[in-house]
Image (cartoon, rainbow, N blue to C red):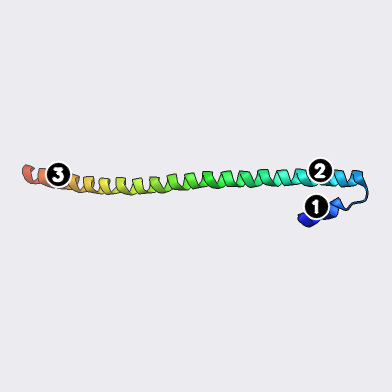
Amino acid sequence: MRDLQSSLRQEPDPRLREEAIRLLEFQQVELMLQLNNLTNLESQLGVVLTFVSEMRSNFFEIQKSLDVLQGEMIDYRSNAQHLLGR
């Protein structure tokens, strides 16, 4: 990019030189905007991945609780059957 800038400054025709420099500056601004968008996207993806990871942990905790509850229900059923003589 710097080589291109340097060669543009050496352009003999001032109108072509100015137009090429403006175009180059515009493209630099566009590249900076795209880079900024990618940085923002990276941050947003980081937030999403953190959220998904936390949800996964929460689902594991819920599953453990459900497993305990299921064991208790089996015990209750067994006790009820025993009390009813079945």
Marks 3 and 2, how far apart at CA: 80 Å
Instruction: Please indicate whether residue 25 sits to the left or right of residue 73 in the image.
Output: right
The one of 81 and 26 positioned closer to us in this rendering: 26
Q: Which residue is mark 2?
A: 22
Q: Residue at x 86, y 44 (%)?
A: 18
Q: Earlier in the sequence, mark 2 or mark 1?
A: 1
Q: Earlier in the sequence, mark 3 or mark 2?
A: 2
Residue type pointed to by label 1: Gln
Q: Nearer the viewer, residue 12 or 77?
A: 12
Q: Is residue 75 found left or right of 66 in the rendered image? A: left
State which quarter of the image contains the N terminus.
bottom right
Distance (Cα) linking label 3 and label 1: 81 Å
Q: Nearer the viewer, residue 39 or 77?
A: 39
What is the x, y in percent for residue 75?
15, 47
Specify which label sits upstream in the sequence, 3 or 1. 1
Q: Amino acid at mark 2?
A: Arg
| Residue 59: % across, % down | 35, 46
Quadrant for residue 14, please give it.
Answer: top right
Seen as rendered, the residue at the extreme bottom is 3
- Residue 53, horizontal then vertical, whole percent: 41, 49
Q: Secondary structure at mark 3?
A: helix
Do the residues under discs 3 and 1 have CB atoms within 8 angstroms? no
Tag 1 residue: 5
Q: CA distance from mark 2 to mark 1?
A: 11 Å
Name which residue type carries label 3.
Tyr
Judged by depth in the image, the label closer to the viewer, 3 or 1, is 1
Relative to the observer, which residue lies in front, 30 or 49?
30
Q: Is residue 3 above or below residue 77?
A: below
| Residue ID at (85%, 51%) | 9
For the residue labelled by badge 2, is the local secondary structure a helix, a strand or a loop?
A: helix
Looking at this view, name the residue that lies furthest to the right.
Answer: 13
> Residue 76, labelled with which disc?
3
